[in-house]
Amino acid sequence: MELSDRKKQILRAVVERYIATAEPVGSKSLVDACDLKVSSATIRNEMSALETMGLLEHPHTSAGRIPTTLGYRLYVNELMERQRLSIEDTELINSMLRNKVQQLDRIISEAGRLTSQLTNYPAYALTAKIHECTIERFAIIPIDIHAFIIVAMLSDDTVKNKLIRLHFEVSSDMLNKLNAILNARFTGLTEAQITSDLILSAERSLGDTLGLISIAVGFAIEILLANKSHESYLAGASHLLEHPEFKDTEKAQRILQYLSNESELLKLPAPDTFGNTRITIGPENLANELKDSSVVVARYHVGDDMEGIIGVVGPTRMDYTQVASKLSYIAQGLSWLLSGGFTLMGDNDDFRK
Amino acid sequence: MELSDRKKQILRAVVERYIATAEPVGSKSLVDACDLKVSSATIRNEMSALETMGLLEHPHTSAGRIPTTLGYRLYVNELMERQRLSIEDTELINSMLRNKVQQLDRIISEAGRLTSQLTNYPAYALTAKIHECTIERFAIIPIDIHAFIIVAMLSDDTVKNKLIRLHFEVSSDMLNKLNAILNARFTGLTEAQITSDLILSAERSLGDTLGLISIAVGFAIEILLANKSHESYLAGASHLLEHPEFKDTEKAQRILQYLSNESELLKLPAPDTFGNTRITIGPENLANELKDSSVVVARYHVGDDMEGIIGVVGPTRMDYTQVASKLSYIAQGLSWLLSGGFTLMGDNDDFRK
DNA sequence: TTTAGCACTCTTGATGTTTGAGTGCTAATA
DNA sequence: TATTAGCACTCAAACATCAAGAGTGCTAAA
């Protein structure tokens, strides 16, 4: 089934007009708005044809047409033109991201916020995590006889630490030994590879009767576990309520609740096309809560291994063109910042002129 | 103006019934529901009196009464009985908080989530920050000739770190010197006390032409600045939509947007009564967006100096009794955990049995 | 001081009625 | 053959009308 150029043009006009106005679009108003070279009657015939093809539908007899899921899909796949971002938008994105790059933990949530702000839809972001993370290196910083800091550098280049207070005394000599044994026996291991046998034998060879090793390895396991799971951020949820399709609060509430559930966010569609955006429309979404919403996601990556996701949720009547362009730009910027030159400090880091 | 006992009883019944049903309460239905010993006509007279006192109001002639702001205020101040939490609730709170205590960063946001979940209203939480924070101690962990980790222990007992990659080589000897000079000259200083003179003279005495000190001190300033500002978390925003007063999406959106604005949250009312909850009702709130909502806040503290806030937002028709009780319990639990025994590790830390 | 009774008010929901945008079809036109 | 003008028809949304019911205030009796 191949569409004539005119049919494509009309489908596109209907989709874009419906996205803009949220009202079913009729033949007359379509002719008025876009300046097509034909009369409303012709449009009517064409629309009727598009309807039998399953691309448009009628809410009821005497109303205009709205796109079906299939109609949106065709629009997204073939008709939509990727639009260039305005200068202001690109500048805004660049400066916002660059400002946050010092705080690596924050940049992801900030990117989500930025996306939401720019698109006027709720946005979410998942942090990038490496699959099997290990600890590359331990360090112990003695504080006093009752406390020390344990520092672990992970294979994904992040560093974690914890201040540990004890209710018994510990010599700095002991801490040195602890440090040595941690680095000798507990580096390069995934969380699953750290067995209680390993701990026992380490305790024996250190002569550790106080459970120091247990404490330190406990910390290691804790952060390896925590690092396994993605973190998720949601921003601009209130934008959902701007759209007439969510004027029914129950509907809105269902979706908002769904979106604020961390574990559900992780299950949202992932982009399969690398680097590009992926769009899932209405019933294409697996989650029941999203059967009449659409999701646009993009992937960003950090180095070669890790990748995170940033996405936008909205009604099926979403401004796909705009959202896809902006999202894609933001994801690219994020990838660039996170993989690239900006984490190298020393040349352009102005902290106080 | 002193209220008779019966008037108090009636006001209380009206408030509680309105909170439960969200419908104006009439004299007849009030007699039916609560078993008052008098007829509806008597109630009518009393209600009419309460209305002239400004405690109740009429939406229109032939409707029941609803409490005014003043009515709620009187209810909250004098009539409300603090209710005991159910065993399940206390157990739930205890176990939830205890589970999260290992991850200190997370416990505050988790407490917010818990509060929202338990009360069915949106909840927010602000992290506790000490007023003037300083760095107590630095540590440098060499990685290779192009990288090292810098660790800072702050006066509030938190530890921050950053992996620093360089585009030039640095000897471990140099790093040792750097470490020594940082600890000698840059500890115990607030962000404002770190001047460029200090940096210059340190660079001179270290013979640092590479800007190592600048990098390290830049990191110090960055975290001191970041540590100054509170962090805020919002949880369960979607609960707002459950209430009929927010069936109008525009209204709901205004409030949700307001609440998701970090800087606005910080301006919300702070409890002045130490440890206890504070309730601000409708127009008592300074923010225009909250003129017909209510806020219940409690304070938690960490040690002697630091204090954070945890609060709940809802319609003026909020279940104050329930919210105040739960919030107060959660804040107390939080204070206890954050100030107390649980951060001491070594005795009860089971990481892998 | 309380209560029963009653007229009155005003919202709410049900039931028409009108309006207008939009359709589908037919017949004329290019 | 493709397009267009014209026209009858449809249906949601907006508006008006009406009855039911919950609630009030007032008066007079207990």
Image (cartoon, coloured by chain):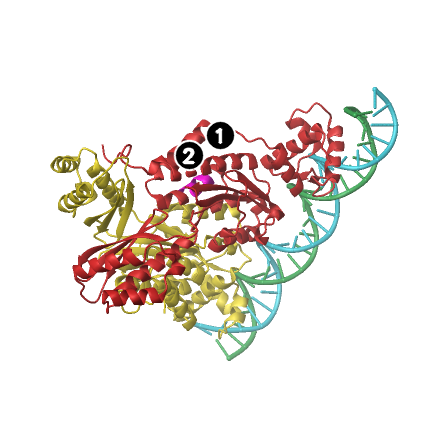
Chain colours: A yellow, B red, C green, D cyan
Look at the picture and state if A72 lies above or below B158: below
In the image, which disc is placed on residue B93? 2
| Picture coordinates of residue B108, whole percent (x, y) | 41, 44
Query: Which of the 4 quarters of the picture holds residue B150?
Result: bottom left
Type of amino acid under label 1:
Leu
Residues in magenta, as a range: B110-117
Q: Which residue is at 55% across, 34% downward?
A: B321
Can residue B18 be seen? no
Report crowding for label 1: few under 14, some 14 to 19, many 20 or more residues within 10 A (C-alpha). Answer: few
Can residue A309 be seen? yes
Q: Which residue is mark 1?
A: B85
Please report contact status of discs 2 and 1: CB closer than 8 Å, yes or no.
Answer: yes
Task: Give the chain letter at badge 1.
Answer: B
Query: Which of the 4 quarters of the picture holds residue A5?
Result: bottom left
Q: Nearer the viewer, residue A105 or A284?
A: A105
Type of amino acid under label 2:
Ile
Report crowding for label 2: few under 14, some 14 to 19, many 20 or more residues within 10 A (C-alpha). Answer: many
Quarter of the C terminus of chain B within the rendering = top left
Look at the image and say whether residue B113 sits in the magenta stretch. Answer: yes
Query: Which of the 4 quarters of the picture holds residue B29?
Result: top right
